[in-house]
Image (cartoon, rainbow, N blue to C red):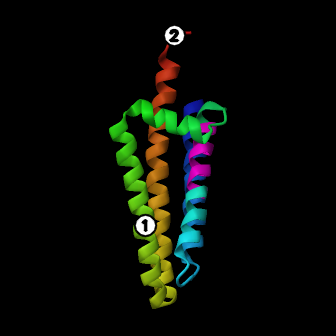
Amino acid sequence: MSSLGKKRLDVAIAIAACAIGGGGISAAPTPGVEVPKQVVLTTSDIAMYTSIWKIYFQEELSNKQLIDMLAELGLVTVAAVGTAYIVSKATTAILCEITDWFGPAGWGIAAAIAGSLTGLFGATWAVYCDYIYRQKEQQPA
């Protein structure tokens, strides 16, 4: 397996682990206390983004570097990504609150939604990191 193929496999495993973990956290019923759960999920997502970066580039990525990179993509991208992320977290919190009323079936739905969103954002970040990695590999030394 090529180096890039190994990195992609490691990233896919990391995204799946975070998505499953996030889904598990979301499945736990917490009537009236969704905000702290969303803080934990957001922290987990940030850890996922930094681990994806580390898999590709073997270097730590600080929150400041992450913000700087998004700024390089353009303010519109930063605003769009930030807004989409905040809206998805708020929507997930509201849906988790509603699904708590339906017992185990609702908890399963909440887990699927949260896991899917984590997977989607992780995959999007992985595609971006993969693109940067391939660009760096093509540059002559």
Spatial CA distance of label 2 from label 1 is 45 Å
Dot 2 falls on a residue whose secondary structure is: loop
Label 2 sits on residue: 140
Label 1 sits on residue: 90
Residue 39 in sight = yes
What is the quadrant of the C terminus in the image?
top right
Magenta span: 44-54
What's the magenta bit mostly, secondary-structure-wise? Answer: helix
Q: 138 or 74: nearer the eye?
A: 74
Q: Residue 53 lies in magenta, yes or no? A: yes
Task: Answer above or below: position of 88 versus 55.
Answer: below
Dot 1 falls on a residue whose secondary structure is: helix
Identified by mark 2, the residue type is: Pro
The answer to whether residue 14 is left or right of residue 69 is right
Residue found at x 53% / y 75%: 34
What is the quadrant of the N terminus in the image?
top right
